[in-house]
Amino acid sequence: MSDYGSGDDLLDDVDPDELLSTGSKRVNVNPAHDSVQHPSKRVKKTLTYEQYDDISRSILKRDFGYDDFRYEQAAAIRAILRGDNALAVFPTGAGKSLCYQIPGIAFEELDAAGLTERQSKTSAIGSGITIVVSPLIALMKDQVDALQRRGIPAACLDSTKTYDEQKSINASIREGRLRILYCAPERLNNEGFVESMKFVPGGIRLVAVDEAHCISEWGHSFRPDYLKVARFVSEIKAERVICLTATATPRVAEDVRRAFDIRESNVFRTSPYRPNLQLHAEAVKTSDDKFPRLLKFLKDHSGPTLVYVTAQKQAEGLARDLSKLGHVAACFHAGLSTEQKTKTQDAFMAGSVRIVVATIAFGMGIDKADIRNILHYDISNTVEEYSQQVGRAGRDGKPSFCTLYICRDDFWMRENFVRGDLPSRQSLQNLLEDIFLHEPTAKLPDGGDVIKLNQLALGKKHDVRASPLSIILATIELRFGLIRAITPEYSTYQFETGPGYDTQVKHDKSPEAKAIVSHNKKGRKWHTIDVNAVANDTMQPRADIIRKLNEFNDKGLIRVKTSGVLSRYKILKTLPSTPKQVGAITDKLHAEMEDRETDAMKRFQTLCDLLTDTQCFARELTRYFGTELPNGKPNCGHCTYCLTGKPVVLPPKPKPPVDLIAIRDILSCCDVRDDPRFLARIAFGIKSPRITALKLDKTEVFGAMQNHEFESLLKEFTKACESEGSAITLFHLTTSATPANINLLPRTPPPSVSLQQSCSDPSGPRSFAFREITYLRYEVSAAVASPQPNTTQLVFELVNESTDISTGCACQNVMSGGDWVDDSHTWYACVDRTITVGGTKYPVKTSALIDWDRWRLTVNQTWVCDER
């Protein structure tokens, strides 16, 4: 979830000390002077473990109402209070938030008791703050509300905050009243925010990194902005860090440890095994068989239920179908409005809605202890995702049921998600050239050049999805050190006028207000204003114009909406400028992205293996995360395998031969020949920016071959693209004992093929470049008596549709005839009328050499090996 729209534009061109003294006179600050640097407090390591535990336990009882800690909570908190970095890998519902909330409260009490020491020579106001970095805005809001109800000073910088609310938060930081501040990882791109955190009175006592598995490129939900958290921690000189996740494999945990310099002894891991959860899986033959099973499950299992599906429309449709049958059900997905999502979540928490049909967007931070059932209508993407979702059931310790339907129909969707994220190498090269050749559009106060990128437009232009594009940009920034992301900005602001627009806005005499009134373009409903253009025309600071727009919005005089996010990057080094330089970076990036695609496919297969192998589900789940069942238990005793002693068996996976007719139809529908992966995506039904822009997802050929292997499609279209424009076209032909239509596709001749051109035209030899589609319609005649033993009559019609690329002239040649052939495996070659071919061997049932000059079919009866 992006933090764009958080009001970060308000911080453009604002000095950090102004951020901490909003509304007051600017204070002169010398960042190089020791007396104004944050004090970097350290805990005096003179307390015993028991004393640390007593301090944290007293806060637990007083502020949260619990008598004691669970799992490894106490150990993780103790490490933080002692000044160490730590990693907590706790299952969903194990209370990870207490591991940073209690230290955030305890620092002030430790200071007051004289149990801390300062490295700076002068004291600072307050006891500093704890910063919590989390991608889950709804979760941050819920935790802040809960802390404030307990009297704990906490705030969240998110997209819903007004300018006045942000000023209030900054004031509470400046005055030492705030203890815990939540923000999204994207906010770390805001240079004003980063600078302001360097001068927080009392310093940054702790940075808590929620969902820390997002840091690892090998985690199941890698987020590139998380790669910048470690840099942020270093730049603001945070005293300590705690990373928290429910789903870190040993490999991911190692990545997190390296990023934040966490000792192995400070990794606190709790087994994901929950003895009250009964894990089941059922093989389902087709998707249509799921709904009857779901109805039976709901009849047999009472209580609050979460049903997880893949797509938003699927969530809406399934919830609607259940409601029609009398079930109290609602849907939840990321596409709903905030009001709709809040309404559904509140109704589920209150018990007025029993069933929520949801995508993965639902469940993060839901503190409902009595969820009795988790049903995966579709298979999860990874073991981590599955573990996280089933962990939302039965937090009250009572028996709960988790059932997953595993169906081969779902596998296509999972592969679709993975295959869509890898661009072709050429697309990546073109994208990088576009970025690196971008002219700087602005300068920073320090003289640095800035480039502005419209990521949406870049993705459409170069056929790269938003998620891999963000990873590409983050890699250029962090690994190659060429650029650095700074505060993004909106290119367009729109506002709808309210009742006070004419009486107050138009009469506001400030230069910013005058600029807004005079430079907006009025539409039927919305007024549009290009803030950058207005700033250039009026010489008013862009930040002042934005601040005024937000001021009018907060007063209800106008209603503002923004669009066209522009990512801004400061250029740190000379950017690559030659194809060779860009190509070197392209090769490295593409190889890494290929590895991630392979890894993602393997992680999905690992989940399938876990659910269909001869093993206890719970035992293998715990082993996946590097732990074992408690007390040496060999198995859980109540999963599907333990109860039946039999594995879940899927129907065999069909492997159809490549549908050559479908491939011909796709090549006919789309003239793209520079990107085989693009054509394979069309065949497999994978949407991409380019496919959507060309509206190819609306054609009949889109997804026509989704039952094929993606890799085999990629090979076929690669061959087709490589043969484009060649004067020679080679084909496969396979005869059959039954009538059939055969589509013959271009095959690229090997480099060893010897081509000789000849021409009967009096004007002499010529070269031809044709785009050809050639196919053969034939049938085997069995009614006519065979004149020779072991022969059959091949009745054929050969159609050649060709376009002269140089002139655009199209023609169609149709040849009919027949001959008696035997069943020998020989080779077949087709050439245009000026070329003869020899030396290339293709295995087919019959062989025919088409002589276009004489319009005659010659049948060969020669055995040939396949040398492809």
Image (tube, grey):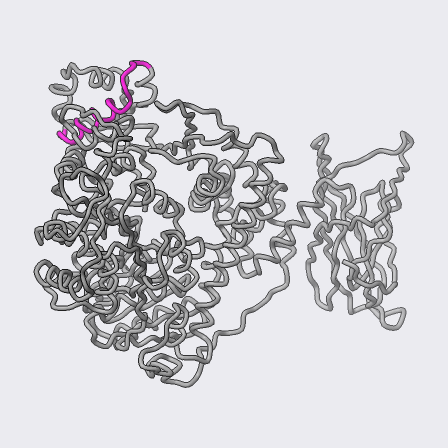
Which residue is nearer to you in this view: 741 or 165?
165
Residue 280 within the segment the image draws in magenta: no
Quadrant in which the C terminus is drawn: bottom right
Q: Based on the displayed image, in which of its 4 quarters is residue 858 positioned? A: bottom right
Residue name at image x 10 percent, y 53 percent: 113
Total labels drawn: 0
Q: What main secondary structure does the magenta stretch of the protein show?
A: helix
Q: x, y percentage for residue 409?
A: 46, 65
Q: x, y percentage for residue 126?
A: 13, 42
Looking at the picture, does residue 11 appear above or below residue 771?
above
Which range of residues does the magenta coloring cover? Answer: 537-556
Residue 550 within the segment the image draws in magenta: yes
Residue name at image x 30 percent, y 23 percent: 531
824 lies left or right of 94: right
Residue name at image x 19 percent, y 59 percent: 46
Q: x, y percentage for residue 397?
A: 21, 74
Looking at the picture, does residue 167 appear above or below residue 744?
above
Q: x, y percentage for residue 541?
A: 28, 20
Q: Is residue 379 visible?
A: no
Which residue is nearer to you in this view: 3 or 663?
3
